[in-house]
């Protein structure tokens, strides 16, 4: 014999209504560079962004790209990045994109590519300076210098970042070493036998020469993984960041730590196929964008 029981609720309460969000919010993209080795990846990021804004579906909302340099970066590198930002502004003139170079003072950054965090020495210092200069009323998107984003990612950052309610920490697709994933050889050059292919890859690794990717990066398990321990990219309203920033004062903590264990602002984490972190072993010419 089967019996059923139910309990009638007199009323349903939604303790907190999610605010209405739109995709036309202004965004300031902040790219901190805390080490000389991050200069070339950041320059590739700027070149890829130039390709985005010159696509047929042109961006009409206000977007600002800012590169923040931690003290210790070679002056020649700073000059090259400044020139790249000017070129980016020229190419994206019709979309009204703005660009700027911030020289941070009195800050020492720790390289965070393998530390998987927006580090206090680099990420937070860059956000501090950017928010102080441009105001706290818009969204600030912190990106790793190794980031490779598609246009759809900017839309999702706008939608998933809600003022006084939610901060967005996307889970990026992190690329494997090109030799390990077999991206440093043409498809027709890959041995049919898996053992032979593995031994050939090990031989290239022992050779220690910088690999050159010969095939475009595709989001699939053979080329990389979604790294849930990576917090190097985030989107937050400037006002919410300013409110939470004192929690990091004097501490060597990830930026996400400022938004944990509190009720004011939620943290949204979601896998993001349109946000990829390139391997820091990718070398070659600056404009070989399909492969680096």
Image: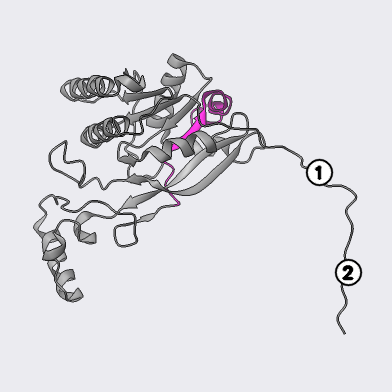
What whole-number distance in Å separates the C-alpha atoms at marks 1 and 2? 22 Å
**Residue 27 appears in which quarter of the rendering?**
top left
**Residue 112 appears in which quarter of the rendering?**
top left
The residue most toward the front is: 56
| Residue in the picture at 62% in, 29% down | 164
Left or right: residue 282 versus residue 140 is: left
Check residue 271 for magenta coloring.
no
Q: Is residue 161 above or below residue 277?
A: above
Residue 253 seen? no
Label 2 neighbourhood size at 10 Å, few (<14), some (14-19), many (20+)?
Answer: few
Which segment did they paint magenta? 228-252
Which structural element holds mark 1?
Answer: loop
| Residue in the picture at 51% in, 23% down | 138
Query: For residue 5, which numbered disc appears in the image?
Result: 2
Residue 172, given in percent of the width and then of the height, sits at 40, 47
| Residue in the picture at 14% in, 71% down | 191
Give whichever of 95, 26 is nearer the camera. 95
For the residues labelled 1 and 2, say whether their Cβ atoms are less than 8 Å apart. Answer: no
Check residue 247 for magenta coloring.
yes
Q: Is residue 163 above or below residue 101?
A: below
Give whichever of 202, 153 is nearer the camera. 153
Look at mark 1 in the image and give the residue it sits on.
13
Left or right: residue 252 versus residue 50 is: right
Quadrant location, the N terminus = bottom right
Quadrant location, the C terminus = top left
């Amino acid at each position: 014999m089967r019996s059923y029981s139910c309990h009638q609720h007199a009323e349903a309460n939604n303790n907190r209504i999610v605010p209405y969000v739109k995709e036309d919010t202004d965004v300031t993209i902040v790219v901190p560079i805390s080490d000389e080795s991050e200069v070339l990846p950041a320059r590739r990021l700027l070149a890829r962004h130039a390709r985005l804004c010159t696509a047929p579906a042109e961006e009409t909302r206000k977007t600002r790209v800012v590169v923040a340099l931690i003290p210790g970066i070679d002056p020649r590198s700073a000059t090259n990045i400044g020139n790249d930002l000017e070129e980016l502004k020229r190419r994206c003139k019709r979309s009204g994109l703005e660009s700027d170079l911030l020289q941070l003072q009195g800050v020492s950054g720790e390289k965070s590519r393998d530390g998987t965090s927006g580090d206090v020495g680099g990420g937070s210092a860059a956000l501090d300076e950017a928010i102080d200069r441009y105001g706290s009323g818009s969204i600030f998107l912190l990106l790793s210098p190794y980031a490779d984003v598609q246009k759809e990612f900017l839309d999702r950052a706008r939608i998933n970042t809600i003022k006084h309610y939610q901060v967005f920490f996307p889970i990026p697709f992190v690329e494997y070493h090109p030799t390990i994933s077999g991206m440093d050889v043409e498809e027709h050059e890959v041995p049919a036998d898996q053992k032979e292919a593995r031994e050939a890859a090990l031989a290239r690794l022992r050779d220690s020469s910088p690999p050159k990717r010969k095939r475009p990066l595709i989001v699939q398990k053979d080329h990389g993984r979604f790294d849930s321990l990576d917090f190097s990219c985030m989107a937050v309203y400037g006002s919410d960041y300013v409110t939470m920033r004192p929690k990091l004062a004097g501490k060597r903590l990830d930026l996400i730590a400022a938004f944990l264990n509190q009720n004011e602002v939620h943290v949204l984490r979601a896998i993001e196929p349109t946000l990829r972190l390139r391997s820091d072993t990718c070398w070659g010419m600056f404009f070989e964008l399909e492969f680096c």
